[in-house]
Every structure is written in structure tokens, then in C-alpha cells.
Amino acid sequence: MRVLVIGCGDVGMRAARQLKSSRVSLSALTTSAERSPALRAAGVRPLLGNLDDKATLSRLAGVFQRVLYLAPPPGEGETGPQWWRDVRSENLGRALRLRALPDALVYASTTGVYGDCEGVWVNETRTVAPATPRAHRRVNAERAMRHLGRSGVRVSILRVPGIYGLDRPSGTPVARLQRGTPVLKERDDVYTNHIQADDLAAACLAALWRGKAQRVYNVRDETDMKMGDYFDMAADLFGLPRPPRVARDAARDQLPVTLLSFMSESRRLEARRMHDELRVRLRYPTVVQGLRGDPARR
């Protein structure tokens, strides 16, 4: 089985470790030759190419049976005439169509495509309502992958919330807590969702083999918590001061726009499909277990 990972960063490398098998030949698209030794050491064959340069992608056509697509859309162009497009996904789709298509493709999107849901429970049938340029580009990428699915590829889309992990770069709230970055007061606070990085990698692989065609899956753990309470819990766990609480009006003067956008969207994700269809068993069912490094017994 020939599997390609596109965007083989932290989560991609975790997926590669979980997938290591004599029955799988694993490759990864990389823009940097400097990453090749690390990829080879992990049992991954590096392929030089760039999603921003479609001429470098032709070698991907007709080779791989399954594709795990983890690369983000471009971050620039937020005010340009086509700020909503993810050209990378369009380039990938064209390249894969050049020869025999893969059997399955999994695209890791973001729960930001739902926009602000005012704290209600959200399942995968909810209409997307992106409120930021990056979320619009994710919606565009999802549509590009679904369009590819109409050609016969079994495309599954994972909508992913905040990713964390004790061994993940910037994977815990410690640095933010040490800076004393404020959170919202209870009356203004928003619900947030999380997934531990190894559990996300496991969900990606489950979707590669068990995901349904043109199917969306919310990926999250079982934690039901507002953002401020999450940071309070983490502060107590790591022995740090709890962050100050401010009203939303004050937060607009103290916090960067990107951070404010995360604090302006409140939703609680349902993940029944992940459990019932993908049969994912979370190693870290709650953020408390994940931040303690205390996996669930199986």
C-alpha cells in the first residue's frame, strides 16, 4: 500500500510512526531538502515539491493509493481579489487527476469553517459560515477536495479544533500563561474544543481506511469547557498563576486580532461520527488527561 502525506509536520510525523508497517510504503511531500534525513530516519521517503508550484507536483500522479492531506492554505492574500481561494488545494487536485487517481484522500480542515455558533452543539450537517479569511480558504479547500471526490476518490474531511500535546512544539498553554495573557470574563467567554496530537493522527489514519466518501467528521475529545476555564485548569495543573479575566471590550484593546478571532467564536462539537464510523478510541479522552500525560486504559 503506497501512502502519501502532504504537510508532514508534527501531526504527519505522528501518523507516520503509527502507520509504520511492512505492508505500507510511506512517502511525504516536502518543500525542503533539509528535512529529507529526518523523514528517512522515520521510514518516510521524501519527495521534493511545492503546492504553490504546480509544475513540481506531476510526480504525485498515479503513484499513491491513499493520500493524507495536512498542509494548510496560504496565509497571505487576505485583502487581495481572491483572498478566499486555496490555490494549493486546486494545484493538488489537478496533479492527482493527471493519471490514475488514489483510492482515498483525507483532508484535515478546521472547525473554524462553522464560524460563531453561540455555544450550541454542532454536528457535521451544519451549514458552514466562515468569518475569517483563513476559514474561507479552508472552505474553498474542502470544496476542491470534494470536487476531486466526484472523480471517484473516496474523500473524507476532518474538521479539527485546537491541537495540543506535551511533546508538541507550543503544544501546551504554558507560554501563554507565563505571559499573563488575559482571558474573557465568564459572561463573555466562549466554548472551545480540543484534540490531543496523537489522537488526531489516529483519527486521520482511521479515516484513510474507514472514512466514507464525501463525508465530514468532527474530531474532538470529550471535554466540554469554556476557554477561560481551560486556562484556569492548565494554570493549576502547571503551578502557574491563573490568567486575568477581562471584559470583551477590554480584550479588543489588549489582544492581537488573530487571538481575538478565536475568542469570538463559541461552539461545542458533536463527534458521534468519529466514534461510530471511524471507530476511534481516544488515548486522551479529556484535556486534563492529555496535559497530565495520563492516557486512558484500554
Image (tube, rainbow, N blue to C red):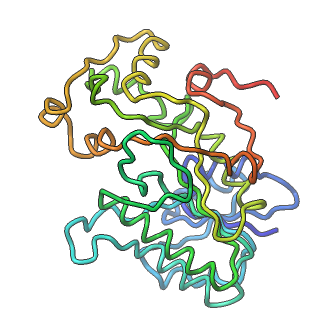
How many numbered badges does the structure rendering display?
Answer: 0
Q: Residue furthest right?
A: 22
Question: Which quadrant does the N terminus fall into?
Answer: bottom right
- Give coordinates of residue 226: x percent, y percent: 42, 28
- Give coordinates of residue 28: x percent, y percent: 63, 63
- Give coordinates of residue 106: x percent, y percent: 63, 64
- In the image: residue 138, left or right of residue 198: left
Residue at screen point 20% across, 32% down: 248
Up-down relation of residue 107 to residue 177 (above or below): below
Question: Which quadrant does the C terminus fall into?
Answer: top right
Up-down relation of residue 204 to residue 182 (above or below): below
Q: Quadrant of residue 45?
A: bottom right
Q: Residue furthest bottom?
A: 98
Residue at screen point 47% across, 51% down: 111
- In the image: residue 226, left or right of residue 9: left
Up-down relation of residue 9 to residue 172 (above or below): below
Query: Quick one: 221 or 271, which is closer to the camera?
Result: 271
Residue at screen point 24% across, 65% down: 78
Up-down relation of residue 68 to residue 169 (above or below): below
- In the image: residue 14, left or right of residue 54: right
- Give coordinates of residue 86: x percent, y percent: 40, 72
Query: Quick one: 88 or 118, which is closer to the camera?
Result: 118
Residue at screen point 63% across, 49% down: 13
Q: Quadrant of residue 211?
A: bottom right
